[in-house]
Amino acid sequence: MPESQTNQPQESGYVPASFEKRTAAWMGIAYALMFLFVVDFAIYTGGRELPGTFPLFLVPVSVALAVVTGRRLKLKTCPGGTACGVFALTLSAAGVLFGLILGWPALLAAFQR
């Protein structure tokens, strides 16, 4: 039997991840760094907590949503059209502002103790 007819797996070329997957990976890196900061803060301050800083965890996902939506609007592939894209950008901007307005003062207060 010739070698070309055997049941060997085909070698496929490299297929890079989609833009959305890469954006999600960067968002995951941001969350990992945030969790690392929270754990290190507790370790190096004798077990102190960071009360009131949870809204800061809304920022990475809001930024990722804005980046993906902005790219989809640019390429005109946004599901729901331009109206839904603008609505998603508005929600993501509100999420960033909400997270920063509620979380940043609590983070600064934790450092002033």
Image (spheres, grey):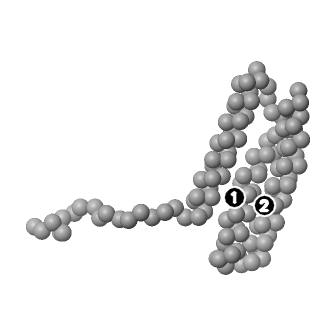
Residue 95: image x %, image y %?
Answer: 81, 56
Residue farthest along the left direction in this orientation: 1
CB under 8 Å between callouts 1 and 2? no
Count of number-bearing discs: 2
- Image quarter of residue 51: top right
Q: Residue at x 35, y 65 (%)?
A: 12
The image quadrant where one finds the N terminus is bottom left
Q: Name the residue under label 1.
A: 64
Residue 32: image x %, image y %?
Answer: 64, 42
The image quadrant where one finds the C terminus is top right
Tell me the element at label 1: helix
* Residue 54 higher or lower than 21, as above or below: above
- Image quarter of residue 97: bottom right
Residue 40: image x %, image y %?
Answer: 70, 30
Q: What residue type is labelled 2?
A: Ser
Q: Which amino acid does label 1 sit on?
A: Ala
Q: Mark 2 points at which residue?
A: 92
Tell me the element at label 2: helix
| Residue 78 in view (yes/no) | no
Left-right relation of 113 to 56: right
